[in-house]
């Protein structure tokens, strides 16, 4: 539990928890917006039983954490447990010290989605979570890697918001809750997967080695040369494939055009790029054997 790897994302957890607390308390609760996930259940417990939201979240987390421990792994579990306490305490003790947003309810919903969503994204990129439904979300992500975290969150958030709105008899709140949930899902996905996003250059040329060298000299990116032949003339061609960042793509295209004016170049957007030179975001899975 005290190994160095368990503390590498701690600054992100702190900053993410602050943003999540501000979005939850100073915007959502201040504007009487329905909360999502365990925060929504905790908010209902606060109204009915007068239990502080933060402590209610902690109580709700215990059984879910025990059930999800095996899937998530020890490292992710302890980081999430730590972050759960941090974010919960910030909701109860730090956020109340800050000004509450008292403006339009729609703007409060937008603020909640952006600020809380950014906070969750920072926490996720630290390979941690705020517990609760996050445990379930990341467990599903671990078992079904092709799904995006924001999409998983959106599905169950709609159900929680619907129940909460019925109990509160607030139809407008249901609409605002959907807005909050949708914005949060977009912010989480764009923040997390934007880290790994990039561009892929697909270049058809008669001199693949030269183009590959140009790419290496221009931005120090590797490339793959695939032998091919033209469909009409059946002349020999090379297809050069290289992944790079958006900024590097401009330099590559200019350099290739200058080196081989006859080359046929395509730029393909890549939502995720993993490997040397690109940052990888993982969730819990890597710690299962720790």
Image (spheres, rainbow, N blue to C red):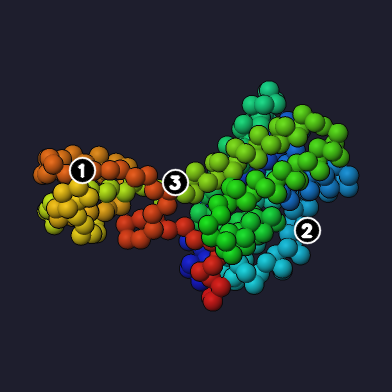
Q: Residue at x 65, y 36 (%)?
A: 180
Q: Nearer the viewer, mark 1 or mark 3?
A: 1
Q: Residues within 10 Å of mark 2 (few under 14, many from 20)?
A: few
Answer whether labels 2 and 3 touch (C-beta < 8 Å).
no
Relative vertical location of residue 6 with respect to residue 246 in this rendering, above or below: below
Q: Residue at x 34, y 45 (%)?
A: 268
Asked which quadrant contains residue 169, the reply is top right
Q: Earlier in the sequence, mark 1 or mark 2?
A: 2
Is 122 positioned to the left or the right of 177 in the image?
left
Relative to 4, is 179 above or below?
above
> SS of the residue at dot 2?
helix
- In the image, residue 163 sits, relative to residue 63, either above or below, namely above
Provide the residue designation for mark 1.
Answer: 264
User: Is 60 left or right of 103, judged from the image as shown?
Assistant: right
Residue ID for mark 3: 194
Q: Residue at x 48, y 67 (%)?
A: 5
In x, y percent, where is residue 57?
74, 53
- Give coordinates of residue 251: x percent, y percent: 21, 41
Q: Quadrant of residue 154?
A: top right
Earlier along the polypeptide chain: callout 2 or callout 3? Answer: 2
Q: Which mark is residue 59?
A: 2
What is the number of the mark on residue 290? none
Q: CA distance from mark 2 to mark 3?
A: 34 Å
User: Which structural element holds mark 1?
Assistant: strand
Nearer to us of marks 2 and 3 is 3
The answer to whether mark 1 and mark 3 are in CB contact below 8 A is no
> Relative to the observer, which residue lies in front, 60 or 213?
213
Q: Position of residue 185 (x, y in %)?
A: 59, 43
Q: Position of residue 117 (x, y in %)?
A: 58, 43
């Amino acid at each position: 539990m005290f190994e160095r790897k368990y503390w590498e994302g701690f600054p992100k957890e702190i900053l993410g928890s602050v943003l999540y607390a501000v979005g939850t308390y100073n915007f959502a609760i201040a504007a009487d917006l329905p909360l999502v996930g365990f925060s929504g259940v905790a908010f209902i417990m606060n109204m009915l039983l007068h239990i502080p939201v933060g402590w209610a979240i902690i109580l709700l987390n215990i059984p879910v954490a025990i059930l999800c421990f095996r899937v998530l792994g020890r490292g992710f579990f302890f980081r999430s447990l730590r972050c759960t306490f941090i974010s919960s305490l910030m909701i109860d003790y730090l956020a109340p010290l800050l000004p509450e947003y008292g403006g339009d309810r729609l703007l409060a919903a937008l603020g909640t989605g952006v600020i809380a969503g950014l906070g969750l994204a920072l926490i996720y990129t630290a390979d941690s979570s705020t517990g609760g439904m996050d445990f379930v979300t990341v467990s599903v992500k671990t078992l079904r890697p092709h799904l995006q975290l924001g999409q998983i969150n959106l599905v169950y958030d709609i159900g929680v918001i619907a129940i909460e709105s019925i109990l509160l008899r607030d139809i407008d709140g249901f609409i605002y809750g959907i807005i909050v949930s949708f914005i949060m899902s977009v912010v989480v996905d764009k923040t997390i997967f934007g880290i790994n996003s990039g561009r892929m250059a697909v270049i058809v040329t008669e001199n693949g080695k030269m183009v590959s060298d140009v790419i290496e000299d221009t931005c120090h990116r590797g490339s793959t040369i695939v032998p091919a032949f033209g469909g009409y003339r059946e002349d020999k061609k090379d297809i050069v494939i290289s992944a790079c960042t958006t900024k590097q793509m401009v330099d590559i295209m200019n350099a290739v055009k200058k080196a081989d004016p006859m080359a046929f170049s395509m730029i393909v957007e890549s939502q995720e790029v993993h490997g040397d030179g690109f940052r990888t975001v993982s969730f819990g899975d890597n710690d299962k054997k720790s």
